[in-house]
Image: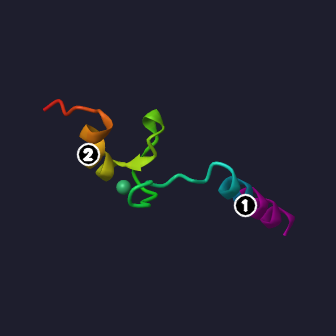
Amino acid sequence: MATIKKQKNERIIEKKGRGNRKCRICNNPNALLRRYRLNICRKCFREYAEEIGFKKYN
Ligand SMILES: [Zn+2]
């Protein structure tokens, strides 16, 4: 029981702290790119890369 309680508390702390790990454009929590602190998913990165300043190399 004590262990479960602890896990729950850790989860809450994570959510409160740096739990904002989802795409800021489409809110997709998967395939996130945290590089350069963009916090966008791969899909949106491909779409917004040029806008942000990244160039495609192919
Ligand atoms: Zn996205």
Q: Under 8 Å from ligand 1: the CB of mark 1? A: no
Quadrant for the C terminus in the image:
top left
Q: Which residue is mark 1?
A: 12
Residue at image mark 2: 46
**Residue at 78% in and 66% down:** 4
Q: Is residue 21 left or right of residue 9?
A: left
Which residue is rendered at x = 27% and y = 41% of the image?
51
Q: Position of residue 8 (x, y in %)?
A: 75, 64
Q: Amino acid at mark 1?
A: Ile
Main secondary structure type of the part rendered in magenta = helix
Residue 27 x %, y %: 44, 61
Element marked by disc 1: helix
Mark 2 falls on what kind of element?
A: helix
Q: Residue at x 39, y 51 (%)?
A: 31
The quarter of the picture where the N terminus appears is bottom right
Q: Which span of residues is magenta-colored?
A: 1-10
Horizontal side, residue 56 vs residue 22: left or right? left
Viewer-proximal residue, 4 or 31?
31
Residue 52 placed where, x, y %?
32, 38
Q: Amino acid at mark 2?
A: Arg
The image quadrant where one finds ligand 1 is bottom left
Residue reaching furthest to the bottom? 1
Depicted 3 relative to depicted 56: above or below: below
Q: Residues within 10 Å of mark 2 (few under 14, many from 20)?
A: some
- Colour option used: rainbow
Q: Based on the displayed image, in which of its 4 quarters is residue 10 positioned?
A: bottom right
Circle 1 packing at 10 Å, graded few (<14), some (14-19), many (20+), is few
Q: Residue at x 72, y 61 (%)?
A: 12
Q: CA distance from mark 1 to mark 2?
A: 32 Å
